[in-house]
Amino acid sequence: MPGKLAQLKPACTSPAAPANTTPAPDWCGRYREVRQASVALAEDLTPEDCALQSMPDASPIKWHLAHTSWFFETFVLEQTQPGYRHFHPQYRVLFNSYYVAVGERHPRPERGLISRPSLDDIQRYRVHVDLAMQRVLQKTASLDPALLGLITLGLHHEQQHQELMLTDLKHLLSRNPLKPAYRPLHPTVGHAATALSWIHYPAREHHIGVNAAPGEFIFDNESPRHRVFNEGYALASRLVTNGEYLAFIADGGYTRAELWLSEGWDVAQAQRWQAPLYWEKPGADWQHFTLAGMQDIDPAAPVYHVSYFEADAYARRAQARLPSEAEWEAAAAHCPLDGNFAEYNNLRALAATPGAHHTPQQLYGDVWEWTQSAYAPYPGYRAAPGAVGEYNGKFMVNQYVLRGGSFATPRSHIRASYRNFFPAAARWRFSGIRLARP
Amino acid sequence: MPGKLAQLKPACTSPAAPANTTPAPDWCGRYREVRQASVALAEDLTPEDCALQSMPDASPIKWHLAHTSWFFETFVLEQTQPGYRHFHPQYRVLFNSYYVAVGERHPRPERGLISRPSLDDIQRYRVHVDLAMQRVLQKTASLDPALLGLITLGLHHEQQHQELMLTDLKHLLSRNPLKPAYRPLHPTVGHAATALSWIHYPAREHHIGVNAAPGEFIFDNESPRHRVFNEGYALASRLVTNGEYLAFIADGGYTRAELWLSEGWDVAQAQRWQAPLYWEKPGADWQHFTLAGMQDIDPAAPVYHVSYFEADAYARRAQARLPSEAEWEAAAAHCPLDGNFAEYNNLRALAATPGAHHTPQQLYGDVWEWTQSAYAPYPGYRAAPGAVGEYNGKFMVNQYVLRGGSFATPRSHIRASYRNFFPAAARWRFSGIRLARP
Amino acid sequence: MPGKLAQLKPACTSPAAPANTTPAPDWCGRYREVRQASVALAEDLTPEDCALQSMPDASPIKWHLAHTSWFFETFVLEQTQPGYRHFHPQYRVLFNSYYVAVGERHPRPERGLISRPSLDDIQRYRVHVDLAMQRVLQKTASLDPALLGLITLGLHHEQQHQELMLTDLKHLLSRNPLKPAYRPLHPTVGHAATALSWIHYPAREHHIGVNAAPGEFIFDNESPRHRVFNEGYALASRLVTNGEYLAFIADGGYTRAELWLSEGWDVAQAQRWQAPLYWEKPGADWQHFTLAGMQDIDPAAPVYHVSYFEADAYARRAQARLPSEAEWEAAAAHCPLDGNFAEYNNLRALAATPGAHHTPQQLYGDVWEWTQSAYAPYPGYRAAPGAVGEYNGKFMVNQYVLRGGSFATPRSHIRASYRNFFPAAARWRFSGIRLARP
Amino acid sequence: MPGKLAQLKPACTSPAAPANTTPAPDWCGRYREVRQASVALAEDLTPEDCALQSMPDASPIKWHLAHTSWFFETFVLEQTQPGYRHFHPQYRVLFNSYYVAVGERHPRPERGLISRPSLDDIQRYRVHVDLAMQRVLQKTASLDPALLGLITLGLHHEQQHQELMLTDLKHLLSRNPLKPAYRPLHPTVGHAATALSWIHYPAREHHIGVNAAPGEFIFDNESPRHRVFNEGYALASRLVTNGEYLAFIADGGYTRAELWLSEGWDVAQAQRWQAPLYWEKPGADWQHFTLAGMQDIDPAAPVYHVSYFEADAYARRAQARLPSEAEWEAAAAHCPLDGNFAEYNNLRALAATPGAHHTPQQLYGDVWEWTQSAYAPYPGYRAAPGAVGEYNGKFMVNQYVLRGGSFATPRSHIRASYRNFFPAAARWRFSGIRLARP
């Protein structure tokens, strides 16, 4: 079967938990589960689907599959396994994303110029790395915490790339005039739109961020825990819907400069934005390209593929604003970590559940929520030493924080303190809008 | 004398303050003083100096002189003087900077394509506006506060453009291979560099921003006053000096990617930065282009013409960081509004005064200080209604806040809560570095 | 075997030539032979090799395979077969190259964004078209000459794309840091470089161009036959060699502005040319990327992958010039149509045969020879009516004529009057240098 | 009077011609006359008019005035006057246009960044050069012919820049929303459009080009005289008129891709051409910006400010083509050197004179006529040795030849063999259309 990636076989036996003890974390199982999820995402794709790059911001699926393996090879196997044999000596350069400390890199906009290694080669590369990692993981009891930290980082890194695989694939397929579908959609219960209400939060001092407990994983950008003062505010009870956004468009949202930030207006004019990315109007009604091909727009479902600029303009017309990340986190810290996550395979955002709610709905999953907060270090932030320290800190400029994860985010990957970040003009990510107001 | 702008004659008599009353503000005098300062800046310039535009970010001097007059014509005279006769019907478009609500604008990058109106014409335009404004100002006692607010805004707006005139002129002259001087420098007392010490501030809640009292002027972006929580921090006792920055360069500051934000590194590579803007190394030593032509670099004077990216990289190497704007304002609120301002005509930043100090020196004047804070609305911020509401709010994205004013800022224009903002890559403004650390 | 294209089976029986008559042209055989040659070129390639586009000027192999089929579908099957069923309704847009009269086109720089149809789909598309064409070709005796002309044009068009397939594939593989080989080289007899001599031609009037005889195929740009006057000139006895070009480089050929056309110098500086395209200097010596991977440079073989600008600069240093196309054709008209053509599968240009020669060697095959002639219509030129009239005429500006074919040109495709044309800065085609002088 | 250039006083006495001898050429008078014409063109301009640069292709008037003086300083005074004192040491770099052999150059797109030297400085520079040249010219009897050749070249060079001054000034003024006029137009006799007829020329061999006789001046690109063969052709009796071009527009000339060269269509789309440069349609009718401001379009006058692409598209719709330069020259060689030249100060092209004509009208003056000939060296062409050899030859690529001069060309500057050349997309020159056909 051309283009299929082999299923990773259960490779190491789960440690049997002795009676009456805290069960040791199942490192082998966790590793296998995350790695397998990447392979499963590419299962129905052709070698060509996996090789193409549709824009400099996106990467080929093949590259994602290789780069996530490169991470383990470079930061775990190379560092800890004397005599580790590289699968291919040049992959070190070829699949380095941006780690300057690791050495030379293949330029990002040229990731789509690499017809070889083939998808089959990359599959073999993954197996090669997995087998070596298996040998490492069987000895986790004796591994030092720093190494376990790197392995955990590698797994969370891979989960980030799983979301990117869907993000980038959607962009690629959208550029094809045949508008091919990735997969058919699961049928879901269709809710009508629920009325938007406001949840109020009084002015007070909060702690946000996290200081990682031993064995707990967080990204360095989530720490340290520190104090902020939030003046009183309210959050919308749910995400902005397609139906509401259609009203924004109908009301001249894309033609009224006074609603927009100046830079946003310039970008919107230059790129001729008239609706969210992937929206088209072949006839009287807007449709949008989805992972299941062109579809009608569900007015009750959350709008997404909007930039910070569009989210901000929408909020301005609604006499509201975007929440700050401190406001969002203070609210989310008390909400169950529950939502429309990658594990449900819905491949799209869904309408909010009707009914009365005392906390905001859809905080987790569905779509990433733009905040008005520029991505910046927390007071006392320190990047990790060495190459992995390049993971987060060096992007802390001209980006805006998004919170909460999306339908393409694994549940095991997200939490209240999690900080994602995109440039203000980015639209190809699964980004939507929650309103706030004083 | 070609190219000279007429001195504005005292045009309205200062109101005589009756005994035993609070003297009424001298609106005529204040107007005359600010307007005259603009004219004085251009006094030694040729028509050609005033007509050229050296890059899209900069504007011709002639345009600054006209646009500041346009502001009074459009927001005061047009609105309040029935039958006001425009000096020229097309100036309304020609000298609109970015006020979409006012109507059509001449494109910014084409401001340097306008050989006519000549500098003489613009001079006559200024006189025309001043005479009409004089008639308005003579009746200030009966004017409504909103109009007085607009007049005050117009004067502060003109002061901002006075600083821009020097900024833009310096850029233009720098592009000339003949490296012409604007004016000779005043001799000043040359201080040696003083040692840098740290002033510590404990963790606590602060109020920052201002709610304007009646008759008090602030820009809308400084309000409302609100609470923030600053974790404990320290500020450097003075600005980073040229001598310190030379050490940064010598230590590979421009060649070590690990010191830089990722986007900053890309910009620095693409634009081949090797030193601050205007620095050149014709022989063994760096020199810099100044408003007095090419000059040796004073190691004790503050470094400036650095971008946010350079300021951040410098701080990282120094194991420090940039202050947040809340940290800066909390410290500055208790310092005297004193420094090397435009009124002293020094035309450059000067070395800090030696001696022991319990508060940071050079907070005001000398050079604008980059903060690590993205320019964003304060909680509860509302833009002013109408076209003047476009003044600040619509630029609140992808810009960083600078504080404290420079040697080109009038003292009467600056205060602790004043927020300036430039893009992270901007270098042609008078921007320097103050360090902070936990 | 994924990615292999099916071999086209002999699909129609060759007409048996009755005794004592001129044998009818074997249309079926000729069609099969040309179509099969395209498939054979892609035989060893992976689906990924065939899907990627390395620059806007180049196209994916898959696109070449589809577009050449589209040509027959659009200009033969659609026009002549009532009820012809298209393989896919959207291929008409997807695989149109530039024929405005045919309707909408998919943008050229986006040919590499089409992961689907897959290579397998394109293979099926080819078979679908071939079967339909077979039905047409079995009736060639009754076909009108215009239709036969279109079929012949389609075959020559496909031969042009066969050369482009190698040209574009070479560019793609060259961008891969792994420097993969397309195929290994046949061993050949290695000649040492022969001395360059000059063949002289007296001043006289010539006829150039062709008026096609019935049944003879030429491109419209080769006609009409017309008179030119050539002043006396001499042509070099062979192509410029790599060895000679190395001397040009060593002599500062890429650093001496006086050797270059002004525009050429600007391009060379902007693109940092230091040698022909694909040349690299990993150590002390230049190597070049070839269809067989990185190889040492054979000093006796012709230099190629040079632009018009480089050819012109080389000639200027040699106190010579490039020939005009009239000079070239006048000389070639009397030479045998013989040379290193695609049929020999050498995949590269070869050294000239040693010995005394009275006519220029290597006129045909090896590398396309830049002439100094801009590509222009011959006096009396008329483009063909309809969409095929867009084939040649609309490119007659800012291009330079090349003559003689290359090692990737089929022998059956070339002739003395054949006019190829590239922009002066193009280097990814198989273009080399022959000198001329008065 | 600011901005006025001093009139050059008669500086050297004309040599008295002795009786019975051929009068010696009046070098002083000729020099004075040409130099004075440049000054006269700038007479009514302000310093600002003379300082601005509206696009990289155009230069400031001040630059033209300086560069033409630089030419004499560099190629005559420096070379021949030991101890010649330069007016300013840096002008050598500042006012070099493109002569690589002379040394460093100031970049062309930055000519508009030079506010100093002022227009007054340049005026003094001209006087300085003129006084030195006067000393040279008083000794012409004893000067060697090479030097006299350089002086003559300098005068012709200056005449070329006189035309460019008007060309560039028109572009600058056109970018000003106030649409200022350079000078009012002279009234002229308004002719109605005359019918277009065809003048036929039989097929035959011609000589074109010139071998300069002693004392005769030609540019190097006009030589050597050589043979060409022209197949039979016809030339239009007059230039294409605005009225005819309006019909082309009305007939969809700018929306029908089939009329255009492929590259021309792309340029026209990218730059949104809908009419010749400077044409605007504020109401129901087209108007055009002229040196006298916005004016109605005279349907009988020749169309100009069209690119090669537009000229070619117009010709294609008219079932005609552009003439080759050999066809044009063969016809013009027998026509009187007569037409609407710069000396008449008409500042625009004029309608052809009605009546019967046996030779084409308007061949000289009015507008430059695009030919279909790419600019290339004549057989046997040799560039002049040294820096002046950079005058012509290095531009012989991707440009098209124009013939005949324009209303801005001095009569003493033009002749039948004169070859002008612009890129195919250029529209800011005074370029129009004459049709040809077989």
Image (cartoon, coloured by chain):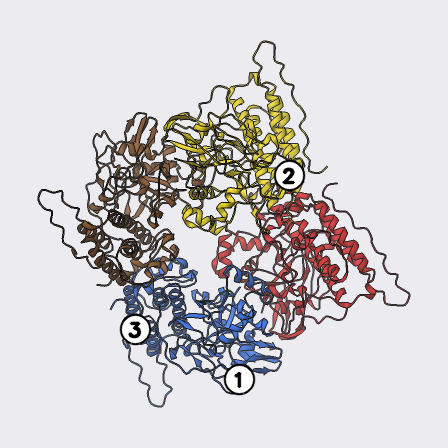
Chain colours: A red, B blue, C yellow, D brown
Q: Residues within 10 Å of mark 3 (few under 14, many from 20)?
A: some
Q: Nearer the viewer, residue C221 or D46?
A: C221
- What residue sits right under mark 2 in the picture? C117
Query: Taking A75 as reference, is C376 above or below it?
Result: above
Query: Does residue B99 appear anywhere in the picture?
Result: yes
Q: Position of residue A261 (x, y in %)?
A: 50, 61
Residue located farthest toward the top when viewing the structure as drawn: C20
Q: Residue at x 31, y 46 (%)?
A: D288
In the picture, the quarter occupied by the N terminus of chain A is: top right
Answer yes or no: are tags 2 and 3 on the same subunit. no
Circle 2: residue type: Pro
Label 1 to label 2: alpha-carbon separation: 70 Å
Mark closest to the chain's N terminus, 1 or 3: 3
Which of pointers 2 and 3 indicates the residue nearer the eye?
2
- Under mark 1, the amino acid is Thr
- The label shown at residue D159 is none
D437 relative to A240 in the view: left or right: left
Give the number of marks: 3
With respect to residue D214, does D232 lie above or below? Answer: above
Q: To which residue does mark 1 refer? A: B359
* Cα–Cα gap, marks 1 and 3: 46 Å
Q: Which mark is residue B135?
A: 3
Q: Position of residue A362 (x, y in %)?
A: 68, 60
